Amino acid sequence: MSQRVYIFDTTLRDGEQVPGCQLTTEEKIVVAKQLELLGVDVIEAGFPVSSPGDFRSVVEISKAVQAPTICALSRAVQGDIDAAADALKYAKRGRIHTGIGSSDIHIQHKFNTTREKIIERAIDATKYARKRVEDVEFYCEDAGRADLVFLAQLVEAVIGAGATVVNIPDTTGYCLPEEYGGKIRYIFENVKNVHKATISIHCHNDLGLATANSLSGIREGARQVEVTMNGIGERAGNTSLEEVVMALQVHKELGLETGIDSTKIYPTSQLVSKMMRMPVQANKAIVGRNAFAHSSGIHQDGFLKHSLNYEIMNPQDVGVDKSDIVLTARSGRHALKHRLELLGFVFEQETLNDLYARFLEVADVKKEVNDKDLVDLAKATVAA
Ligand code: KIV
Ligand code: ZN
């Protein structure tokens, strides 16, 4: 039987922190409803103390969305925790996500304090948050660069204080996959009460390793992963929802599943991109324009013989209509013949060879040969 990995979506909090991606409350509700359809388990809806607008967004999302848990961020201070709890008043299931720095860099240069004081503040914040809501997630900020022994002490302390979920963020995207997975393994092996809480993964993509690190943490036993749609987020972004979900879906041998309806991935990606005014790069895994496009002759020929030759999932699995054969000067006869047939033109091999030569002349000039160009070429061939 597969084990469940819970999807915590922070598109509306970490994702929305990106300059230029800010949304109005009404826009956030549209995105939150789509995330609910997609099947995420938790929606991090905002950071209520940060502005009246963010507070209102958490209130309204709590009213508009029923199935996922609604989460609100706070620092480990009472005012933040109160704002988060107040904003979650209408949530069917509300969670406060509080926390503090855990690396010596943060402890010294951000909080100007000591490890001991950090543990005290963490315990106080967790206990205080638990007085307001049942479900409290604690984040150990910059855990990616934290001392492992201290990190384990902090995790043990907040679980003891009532945290239901403990988040181990690689805030600066610093770790390598084995290193990050090793931290999660160490926590499972050294924190006495670890099974009283869910261990959560939250990775940033500064070295392009967010998905690899998240999978590494999941394989070591973490059962919640924090992600954003299209991987948007601070600096180089957060772990992409679509990448983790499809990696687990494609690699069934891992025995891990999510509650995501993968056929809603592409429409959700498009919605988020449009509303946040953040284009998706063409070669983005799963949701990029080229993710299911084949353009070289060798690949097109292999794909047309059997899609499995060059595709590890069906485009329909992620809500994309169909794969694309892009005709360029690198395309071969097989792809040209296939496209012409779809357009209603069937030629003998010899005629096709002549047409192919003319096609290459056009393709060398144009970047991509479109259907109109092909129809013109085919009609000229028929008329000759
Ligand atoms: O990256 C990070 O550490 C965060 C925390 C606030 C969870 O986003
Ligand atoms: Zn983050």
Image: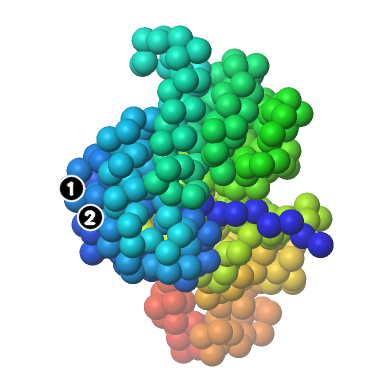
Q: Residues within 10 Å of mark 2 (few under 14, many from 20)?
A: some
Q: Nearer the viewer, residue 26 or 57?
A: 57
Q: Nearer the viewer, residue 352 or 77?
A: 77
Q: Are marks 2 and 1 in contact (CB under 8 Å)?
A: yes
What amino acid is labelled 1 in the image? Pro
Q: Which residue is mark 1?
A: 52
Residue drawn at x 27%, y 62% is: 60
Question: Which amino acid, by three-letter code, is at mark 2?
Answer: Arg
Q: Nearer the viewer, residue 365 or 316?
A: 316
Q: Residue 28 appears at what percent x and percent y?
A: 30, 60
Label 1 CB sits under 8 Å from any ligand 1 atom? no
What's the residue at 44%, 77% (across, down)? 371
Query: What is the crowding at mark 1: few (fewer than 14 residues within 10 Å), some, or many (at least 20)?
Result: few
Residue 177, horizontal then vertical, whole percent = 66, 31
* Percent of width and height locating residue 297: 64, 60
Residue 375, label in figure: none
Q: Rounded to the nearest whole Å, what is the CA distance between mark 2 and mark 1?
A: 6 Å
User: Residue 139 or 22: which is nearer the viewer?
Assistant: 139
On residue 56, the disc is 2
Q: Residue at x 55, y 81 (%)?
A: 340
In the rendered structure, the answer to whether residue 220 lies left or right of residue 197 reads: right
